Image (cartoon, rainbow, N blue to C red):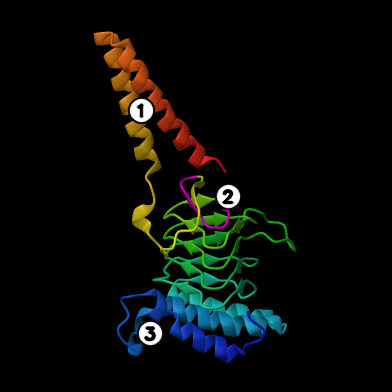
Amino acid sequence: MDSRLSLWQIIKEDFQTPWKNDPAIKSKFELFFNYPGIWTIINYRIAHWIYEKGFHFIARVIMGFTQIITNIDIHPRCKIGRRVFIDHGVGVVVGETAIIGNDVLIYQGVTLGGVSLDKDVKRHPTIKNNAVISAGAKVLGNITIGENAKVGANSVVIKDVPDNSTAVGIPARVITKGKDKSQLSHNKIPDINKELFIYLSKRIAVLEDAITHHHEDIVAKRDEELEKIYRDFISTMKD
């Protein structure tokens, strides 16, 4: 949390965040009934402040009641930056040692979880500024999601994702690098399984043509084109 601003200034900023991130909002009245993510963040702000003062049990109780009401589980010890927006929010889990930067967008069903039972170590992810974690994604362990990075829906991330990159899949792999000016663009995330299926179908067609018609010169050319497509595809999958 930014020490230059008071707790109440940051909470006021949290109330303004939905207007920047959700085109569905039409009135301030909706904030009270349709945005559990906002109320969870605000309760977290208060609980985190209490936790930092040493009243750990009270902070945990506050977030426990918040979880019952909103179905969002955030540990009061974790660190969450400014203007973080949890959209819809149901099923979101943020672990004890997670760190979330500024202007991060998190969708429903996201888990920022740990893979270790060791105490007094950082067990949870760091999400840097302007990252987007899409619905159902699981980001596990002491890894870093870079600035402006995107994690595709239902991906399982167990390795660092560089700045300005998009990662998808189980386990997630980086498929694009280079800053994308669009904030979300779920529709631009490629279907890895589909791409491989299309490649294999074309490869089989080339082999069948070679066996049936003996068009070696044409087959060789098509095979070379397919090999280039395959190499380009594999290069985008490398970490």
Q: Residue furthest left?
A: 213
Mark 3 or 1: the one toward you: 1
Give the residue type that dot 3 points to. Leu
Tell me which residue sits at (54%, 40%) in the image.
238
Circle 3 packing at 10 Å, graded few (<14), some (14-19), many (20+), is some
Give the spatial CA distance, label 3 vs label 2. Answer: 34 Å
Quarter of the figure with the N terminus: bottom right
Dot 3: element = helix
Tell me which residue sits at (52%, 83%) in the image.
42
Dot 2: element = loop
Residue holding disc 3: 31
Taking the image as shown, residue 135 lies to the left or right of residue 160, namely: left
Residue holding disc 2: 158
State whether the magenta stretch is mostly helix, strand or loop: loop
Residue holding disc 1: 200
Dot 1: element = helix
Q: Is residue 192 above or below residue 157?
A: above
Tell me which residue sits at (54%, 76%) in the image.
64
Taking the image as shown, residue 162 lies to the left or right of residue 179, namely: right
In front here: 120 or 143? 143
Mark 1 or 2: the one toward you: 1
Give the residue type that dot 2 points to. Ile
Give the spatial CA distance, label 1 vs label 2. Answer: 28 Å
Splitting the image into 4 quarters, where does residue 36 fall?
Answer: bottom left
Asked if the residue under mark 1 is in contact with the one under mark 3, i.e. CB atoms within 8 Å, the reply is: no
Q: Is residue 69 visible?
A: no
| Sequence-first disc among 3 and 1 | 3
Range of the magenta residues? 159-170
In front here: 12 or 73? 12
